[in-house]
Amino acid sequence: MSTSKARLEENHASALAQTWRAFIASPTGVAAGVVFVILVALAIVGPIVWGDPATHLDIFNGRRSPSWQHLLGTDPAGRDILARVVVATRLSLGMGLAGAMISAVIGIPIGIAVAVAGPRLRDVGGRLIDLWLSFPYLLVVIFLSAVVANVGTLSALFAVGLAGAPRLARVTNTLATSIGGREYILAASAAGIGGPRVLLRHVLPNIAEALCISVFGLVGSSIIGFSSLSFLGIGVQPPAFDWGQLLTLGVQDIYATPLAAMAPGVMIAAAGVASGYLGEGLAHALNPLLWTASRGQARADSPTLAGFRDPVPDYSATDRSAEEVLVVDGLTVRLPMDGRLVPVVDSVTFGVARGEIVGIVGESGSGKTMTALAISGLVPFTATVSARRLELNRHSTLSGGRERERIFAAGLGMIFQDPMSSLNPALRIGTQLKEGARHSRGIGSGAVTDRAIQRLREVHVSVPELRLRQYPHELSGGMRQRVMIAMALMNEPSLIIADEPTSSIDVTIQAQIVALLEEINRSRHASIVLISHDIALVSSICSRVLVMYAGRIVEEISARGLAAGEAAHPYTRMLLSAVPDLSRSREEPLVNVPGQSPDFANLPAGCPFNKRCPLAVDKCSRDRPELFPIRTFNTRAACWVAQDAVQ
């Protein structure tokens, strides 16, 4: 029991440390936190230290200019302006926090209730929230304050708190509705978990980040609302005073003592801005997905990465052709999982020669697409990328900035899997084709239009002049994919990365797209990296194939050897066996790869494929193999069994 308690305390301390590191990684959040702490400190000690100068009347010293005794001067009644502004912090900041809390207590439950209500109630509730929000915030505050018919602090608190509730209700309703149909919500409901528990355990934690930003943003709005009521004379009443009341008095005498109006105005603005940015910083810190990604690259000696690195042949030391377009050496991509950075692409090394077509195959989740995204600089913002070398046309793309954008614009073209989601539905085809070339190459309007028409002709799009004026939804799936290929060719790239370019179109069009890629390769001598699940397709068009599993290349083989069944790695052989063969009898069952793809956060020791491999030996569960030449099959495979067979 004591061990379990110590472990819980250790995990809690670790989570707090990660939260703190994520918070300080946000410069605006840290700056806002410092300002907010100063305001809280002033609210606590201000009335104690500066209470007397703030309230002491001395009409003989009224409207004094700033001096060492009165840093901001005095008001017409001789009271110290700085002291009054500092003392007013307690009431202004306290009322702002209280108003935001009232709004949260009222608005968040309403938003959730509307989200989980039936269709009719959901529609009616949403309309009522929208109606409430259609009125200006300050107008609602003034109206509610008048409804109470009791001028003072409490009525102002009620008015501001109730006026802010619809904003949080709308945010909560939208967020809760957006995740209401997610698989994990449906699974929890199917498992018999009651509605309130689903809300507390599954819905609220997933929208807490956005709610945190909204609530803290509402603190600033509440302070402005209270100050506005006091400015109009229906908020805080004398002898109490807040920043709004001080602003009213200062404006009345602004020409004689301008600092009396400027000082409370600056405090109102500082409190509003600080609360907003503090909410963003806290939301960043409370999001566990950002804990490990908030400081960029993980340290190479990080203990959380132990066991994920193993020797890879030094690409820089190998004899490669000077004509290589792409050089990838030790590419590693890490994503935050379970509070640590986990490699989803692990020490990948390969090259692509000019005019070569290289295929990358593997199951879903093997790291194919993430490899392509890392090469093209399109990884998610939570990911970190590292490599010994990552070069396109002999230019390193590891550094960011405009130089990398220029390298990509001049030498890389991307063809994505789903052209409908990759093309902007609100823009015409011509606009999307031309904007890249105009932005990166500075080509004139007439010349870039001619180039777009020529590229559409090259990919066999009929009537290209008409297509330029059409929208994506007006084209068929195959035609949209041709437009995507034409877009990739606009800047005449030396390398094209095609990520599942045939998966979202029918079989007859697939053959045309494959033939088109081969034609582009021949006519333009462009290198192509083709990513696909279809191992038969890849072996028919590529000269070399990389087989990926668990984020690593487990075999590199020629397409001719792959087609001849000369694969050395058991995983590659299983993929080949799973390809449907029309020569088989109907009674013969289809072959599948047993088991499931491994979890990157919990990869098994040794070879990651050992749990699914029928040939695995004891060594496979202890040591992770590296790519090793298998001369019998003229391939390289990361497999202990294949290596032992040739030794």
Image (cartoon, grey):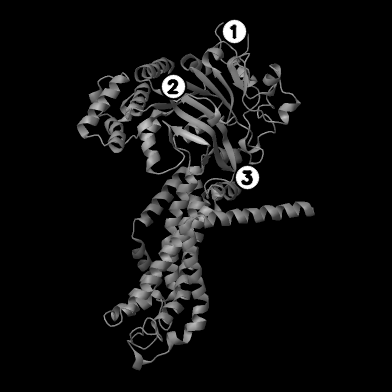
Residue 224 in view (yes/no): no
C-alpha distance separating marks 2 and 1:
27 Å
| In the image, residue 259 above or below residue 113 | below
Q: Secondary structure at mark 1?
A: loop
Q: Residue 239 occupies which quadrant of the picture?
A: bottom left
Q: Secondary structure at mark 3?
A: loop
Of residue 543 and residue 343, the one placed in the foreground of this image is 543
Of residue 360 and residue 223, the one placed in the foreground of this image is 360
Q: Position of residue 105 (x, y in %)?
A: 51, 60
Q: Please report whichever mark, 2 or 1, sits nearer to the chain's N-terminal start.
A: 2
Residue type beneath disc 1? Arg
Residue annotated with mark 1: 586
Residue at 29%, 81% (x, y): give it.
253
Bin the neighbour count of mark 3 within 10 Å (Cα to Cα): few under 14, some 14-19, many 20 and up: few
Q: Residue 562 occupies which quadrant of the picture?
A: top right
Residue type beneath disc 2? Thr
Looking at the rendered image, the disc whose residue lies closer to the viewer, 2 or 1, is 2
The numbered dot on residue 301 is 3
Of residue 603 and residue 511, the one placed in the foreground of this image is 603
The numbered dot on residue 91 is none
Bin the neighbour count of mark 1 within 10 Å (Cα to Cα): few under 14, some 14-19, many 20 and up: few
Residue annotated with mark 2: 502
Looking at the rendered image, the disc whose residue lies closer to the viewer, 1 or 3, is 3
Q: Are marks 2 and 1 in contact (CB under 8 Å)?
A: no
